Image (cartoon, helix red, strand yellow):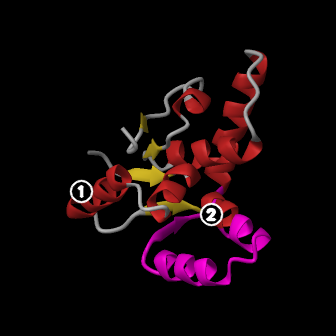
Amino acid sequence: MTESLVDTDILSFYFKGDTKVVESFREYLRVFEVINLSIITYYEILGGLKAKNAVKQIEEFETFVGNKAIIHISQDSANLSSNVYADLRKRGITIGASDILIAGISLVNDLTLVTNNERHYDPIRGLRIENWTK
């Protein structure tokens, strides 16, 4: 197991109580002190909950986030993300800006991206991916 950045979809599986994902979180925390989330994932989860006016879930999420590492976009990660965007565009591959920013944060911080959306991130060169749903 390597130090990782948890993508939005994996966090959704966790909150839904997916047994494989919950166990992977437990295993990870036996080795590493905290779960790493990007500020993009924070935004995506919180935005989705607010759109549903899920007040109780928002409170639960904020409590959950309280002891997690939120990794912000830095100038270095933005620069690396722009390189990823340019490379993908030259190869005719389209990926959403949020996902490119998450990948950049993961790459610049040397973190494995934990996602269930493997095919989506596969074209990004140098990005290590794990899927905790399998």
**Residue 51: x, y in percent?**
79, 69
Question: Mark 1 or 2, which is nearer the eye?
Answer: 1
Kindly indicate the quadrant of the structure image that contains residue 43.
Answer: bottom right
Helix or strand or loop: what does disc 1 sit on?
Answer: helix
The Cα–Cα distance between marks 1 and 2, rounded to whole angstroms, is 23 Å
Kindly indicate the quadrant of the structure image that contains residue 14.
Answer: bottom left
Q: Which mark is residue 2?
A: none
Q: Residue at x 47, y 44 (%)?
A: 113
Q: Which mark is residue 39?
A: 2
Is 61 magenta? The answer is: yes
- Placement of the N terminus among the 4 image quadrants: top left
In the image, residue 57 sits, relative to residue 119, either above or below, namely below
Residue type marked 1: Glu
Q: Residue at x 61, y 48 (%)?
A: 102
Q: Which residues are magenta?
A: 46-74
Circle 1 sits on which residue? Answer: 27
Helix or strand or loop: what does disc 2 sit on?
Answer: helix
**Residue 85: x, y in percent?**
73, 32
Pointer 2 local density, CA inside 10 Å: few below 14, some 14–19, many at least 20: some
Choose between 112 and 75: the one closer to the eye: 112
User: Residue placed farthest to the top in the image?
Assistant: 91
**Residue 99: x, y in percent?**
66, 43
Q: Residue at x 46, y 69 (%)?
A: 69
In the image, residue 81 sits, relative to residue 34, either above or below, namely above
Mark 1 vs 2: CB contact within 8 A: no
Is 10 magenta? The answer is: no
In the image, residue 125 sits, relative to residue 133, either above or below, namely above
Mark earlier in primary sequence (1, 2)? 1
